[in-house]
């Protein structure tokens, strides 16, 4: 071992003291004996005679930072040592990490994102201290003998095993080097694993650079310690330097805040989950019961306790306090504060007054928003906004208790511009913000604010087209921001999404300004509903949610009301069958083709008749399309804004088409318990009438020869404003945009899951049989023009659809289709073959010849 200069100096000092002050001691006399080189430095290096290293000696040149785990930081090198006391051994702690700053190029590594909480234990193993991640997924009844085998085949994770550098017998303290804990990816993986098949030219982080990685800040408190590390990933050369947010692709910093937290010691009572209400949970399997549902899933909630337990309504001992970060736009502070406090309406029903309190972070505050002791509503204006809003919470993995939360909001919510161009110019079009971009490190992602921006733009476009005042535009903005804030706060209270909630009101009620005034427009603020714009401008009322919904009030009671007994909780749960308590979350939602089964659980739909509401939206968009060139062309400005409006209107139509398509082959799900009042049955297929209505709507508004008509002279103006030397993506590619929207629908209605379900559900009530549906679809795509000239949009659609049918029979994916579906595909191909006789103009004859050739060749291939 190499001694540092300071350590060598220290040894000299000890020997000098020993020689001059204690000449009579045995030790000192021994040291006087000269060895062969005859100097004291050599004596100091002789192991037998070396003075024992002590915490004091090893931390001599360090600054002491006291708290949960005392830290010593060397004043010359910055190296960290950490003290663990004997009574901290074998105890559990929480590790919680948050990204302080990152780059979106490296994956969703962005300011404020939570990287999960884990429980770990500190153990001593001979001369080492171990940090061991604990498994919290199982429960064993301690009274059951099998609980003695509770560790069988469950792997704990030894994250670090660090040598004890010194031990102090009197104070029972161990000293370890902390660099291995905080300067490496010990507690969590930060650099994403490279996925097989990713392009070698895509942006990648280099290797963790030991020399450059450093500790930027240490805050130590009695029950938690916060260490901010700047991880530097380096490489000598790079093919891809990343976006302009990356200054140097060879040296990328990711700043991470590590928090080590003592388990809260309080009288918090965990509460169990129920499938009828949507809380985030810590999943726990009970291994000692024989039930078919051995779940002990703990819901995530704050520790709220009444000051006066006997009062009907009482203030909590400790309210949930939100701080508005000092970066919050001043003009919006009042709106944001009021939105947060809307939740107190729900808490009052659960027996709490002023459960939530909002405070303003002063400009000269000495704490920052990364401090877990503060729940902060944060604002940033990122170069590549990952979302408009995000509301993660930090919880105790053992109990589900929420210990802290933040909400990250992007300034783009007020501006929108950059973001808009991003979604429209990406290859997947509008729907790319419907598909959750999952990041396994986060508990969930909330895409509401992204959708809200799109909705907001549509509402403003439509209002502007009708000559709305500045005041009305402000109202639209205010309602949208209010809705997003209430929604994100809902997540931090433990609530997950409720994508079924938009079923509550009829289209008539939503077009009744007086009726909806001051309301949440769905049963729950936790839904993603499409913005409420009425086709009849004179009936326009509220655009967005301005408070919590009835489901939210009910759910907060289930999570927070101090129940007198289990019967009281069960009685409240039994109210799940009320229409206003309707619930279905992300796992049940149908946003992606082929996913889930209940069409009511859908994103960006609205009303108890989503088919009608969606048709209205398509018609409104079509009407507006005729106006936009006049309304959105401004003298002296480029046509960039007009282009943006065109994509907004097209996007609303595409989204509405997806909503309608989910009704075909749809099955309504009821999660009521057996015998519960108001229960229907778990599965009920969508009625024949509604499926047929959906099919007819798709025929008219998605597949017909004129479905995506826009005034022809609009296409001449869909130009982006040129920017800089490397301006690209000039070409609006109109046909591929339209075909993409149509394919999104076909991908769902021809998905193996959908086709299989249509056949299966014929067994239990589905009257819209596979044969009827597939015949209807064939007609919708061919009948109106196959005997005459076929326009270029329809040629695209007909070929695409024909290829899909062929793929069902001959491609690698054909194995996932049922035999019934394949037979219908073949039947339809033969019908197309006979319809596609030569007729119409030359382009149409060529198209039909193409169809016939494809089908003839495919039929030869069918085995
Ligand atoms: Zn959300």
Image (spheres, rainbow, N blue to C red):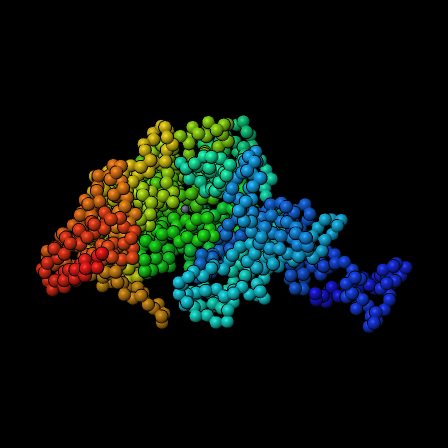
Q: Position of residue 795 (x, y in %)?
A: 18, 59
- Relative to 707, say whether 766 is above or below: above
Count the marks: how many? 0
Taking depth in this image into account, of 585 and 180 the one nearest to the observer is 180
- Relative to 755, say whether 229 is above or below: below
- Tell which residue pokes out farthest to the front in this image: 863
Q: Is residue 358 left or right of residue 223?
A: left
Q: Position of residue 95 (x, y in %)?
A: 56, 50
Q: Residue at x 73, y 65 (%)?
A: 6
Q: Is residue 89 left or right of residue 621?
A: right
Q: Position of residue 207 (x, y in %)?
A: 52, 65
State whether residue 289 appears in this view.
yes
Q: Is residue 71 left or right of residue 148?
A: right
The quarter of the picture where the N terminus appears is bottom right
Q: Residue at x 57, y 54 (%)?
A: 159
Q: Position of residue 702 (x, y in %)?
A: 22, 51
- Tell which residue pokes out farthest to the right in this image: 24
Taking depth in this image into account, of 481 and 302 the one nearest to the observer is 302
The quarter of the picture where the C terminus appears is bottom left
The quadrant in which residue 349 appears is: top left
Q: Residue at x 54, y 32 (%)?
A: 306
- Tell which residue pokes out farthest to the left in this image: 839
Q: Residue at x 50, y 38 (%)?
A: 286
Taking depth in this image into account, of 434 and 32 the one nearest to the observer is 32
State whether residue 606 appears in this view.
no
């Amino acid at each position: 071992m190499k001694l540092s200069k300071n350590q060598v100096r220290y040894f000299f000092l000890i020997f000098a003291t020993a020689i001059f002050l204690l000449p009579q001691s045995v030790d000192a006399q021994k040291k006087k004996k000269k060895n062969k080189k005859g100097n004291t430095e050599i004596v100091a290096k002789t192991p037998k005679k070396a003075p024992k290293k002590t915490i004091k000696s090893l931390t001599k040149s360090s600054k002491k930072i006291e708290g949960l785990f005392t830290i010593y930081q060397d004043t010359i090198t910055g190296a960290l040592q950490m003290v663990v006391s004997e009574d901290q051994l074998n105890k559990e702690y929480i590790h919680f990490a948050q990204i302080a700053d990152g780059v979106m190029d490296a994956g969703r590594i962005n300011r404020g994102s939570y990287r999960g909480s884990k429980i770990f234990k500190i153990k001593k193993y001979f001369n080492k201290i171990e940090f061991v991640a604990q498994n919290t997924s199982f429960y064993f009844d301690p009274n059951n003998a099998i609980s003695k085998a509770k560790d069988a085949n469950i792997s704990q994770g030894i994250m670090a095993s660090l040598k004890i550098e010194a031990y102090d017998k009197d104070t029972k303290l161990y000293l370890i080097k902390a660099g291995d804990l905080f300067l490496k990816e010990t507690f969590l993986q930060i650099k994403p694993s490279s996925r097989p098949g990713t392009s070698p030219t895509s942006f990648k982080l280099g290797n963790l650079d030991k020399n450059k990685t450093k500790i930027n800040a240490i805050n130590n408190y009695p029950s938690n310690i916060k260490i901010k590390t700047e991880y530097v990933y380096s490489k000598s050369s790079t093919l891809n330097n990343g976006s302009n947010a990356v200054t140097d692709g060879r040296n990328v910093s990711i700043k991470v805040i590590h928090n080590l937290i003592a388990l809260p010691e309080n009288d918090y009572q965990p509460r169990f989950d129920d499938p009828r209400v949507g809380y985030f949970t810590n999943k726990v399997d009970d291994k000692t019961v024989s039930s078919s549902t051995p779940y002990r899933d703990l819901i995530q909630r704050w520790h709220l306790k009444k000051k006066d337990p006997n009062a009907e309504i009482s203030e909590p001992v400790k309210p949930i306090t939100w701080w508005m970060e000092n970066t919050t736009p001043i003009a919006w502070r009042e709106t944001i504060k009021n939105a947060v406090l809307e939740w107190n309406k729900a808490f009052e029903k659960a027996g709490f007054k002023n459960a939530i309190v909002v405070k303003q972070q002063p400009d000269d505050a000495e704490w920052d928003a990364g401090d877990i002791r503060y729940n902060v509503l944060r604002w940033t204006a990122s170069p590549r906004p990952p979302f408009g809003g995000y509301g993660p919470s930090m919880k105790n993995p053992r109990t589900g208790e929420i210990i802290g939360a933040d909400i990250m909001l992007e300034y783009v919510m007020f501006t929108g511009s950059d973001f808009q161009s991003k979604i429209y110019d990406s290859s997947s079009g509008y729907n790319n913000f419907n598909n959750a971009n999952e990041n396994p490190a986060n508990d969930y992602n909330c895409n509401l604010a992204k959708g809200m921006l799109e909705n907001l733009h549509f509402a403003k476009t439509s209002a502007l087209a009708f000559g709305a005042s500045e005041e009305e535009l402000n109202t639209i903005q205010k309602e949208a921001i209010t809705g997003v804030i209430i929604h994100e706060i809902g997540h931090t209270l433990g609530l997950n999404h409720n994508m079924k909630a938009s079923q509550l009101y009829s289209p008539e009620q939503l077009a009744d300004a007086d009726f909806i005034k001051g309301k949440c427009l769905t049963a729950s603020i936790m839904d993603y509903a499409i913005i409420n714009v009425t086709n009849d401008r004179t009936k326009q009322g509220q655009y967005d949610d301005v408070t919590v919904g009835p489901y939210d009030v009910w759910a907060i009671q289930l999570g927070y009301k101090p129940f007198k007994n289990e019967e009281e909780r069960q009685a409240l749960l039994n109210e799940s069958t009320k229409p206003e308590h309707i619930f279905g979350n992300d796992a049940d939602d149908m946003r992606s083709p082929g996913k889930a089964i209940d069409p009511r659980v859908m994103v960006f739909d609205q009303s108890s008749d989503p088919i009608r509401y969606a048709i209205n939206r398509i018609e409104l968009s079509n009407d507006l399309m005729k106006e936009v060139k006049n309304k959105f062309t401004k003298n002296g400005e480029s046509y960039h804004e007009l282009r943006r409006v065109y994509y907004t209107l097209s996007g609303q139509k595409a989204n509405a088409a997806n909503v309608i398509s989910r009704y075909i082959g749809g099955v309504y799900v009821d999660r009521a318990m057996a015998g519960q009042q108001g229960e229907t049955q778990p599965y009920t297929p969508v009625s024949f009438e509604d499926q047929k209505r959906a099919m007819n709507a798709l025929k008219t508004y998605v597949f017909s020869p004129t479905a995506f008509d826009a005034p022809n002279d609009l296409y001449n103006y869909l130009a982006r404003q040129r920017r800089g030397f490397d301006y690209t993506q000039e070409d609006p590619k109109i046909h591929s945009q339209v075909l993409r929207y149509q394919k999104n629908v076909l991908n769902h209605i021809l998905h193996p899951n959908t086709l299989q379900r249509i056949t299966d559900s014929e067994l239990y009530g589905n009257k819209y049989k596979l044969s009827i549906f597939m015949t209807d679809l064939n007609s919708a795509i061919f009948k109106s023009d196959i005997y005459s000239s076929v326009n270029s949009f329809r040629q695209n659609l007909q070929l695409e659809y024909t290829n899909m049918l062929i793929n069902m029979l001959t491609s690698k994916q054909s194995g996932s289709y049922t035999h019934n579906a394949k037979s219908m595909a073949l039947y339809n191909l033969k019908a197309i073959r006979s319809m596609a006789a030569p007729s119409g103009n030359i382009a149409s004859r060529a198209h039909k010849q193409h169809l016939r050739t494809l089908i003839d060749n495919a039929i030869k291939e069918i085995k």
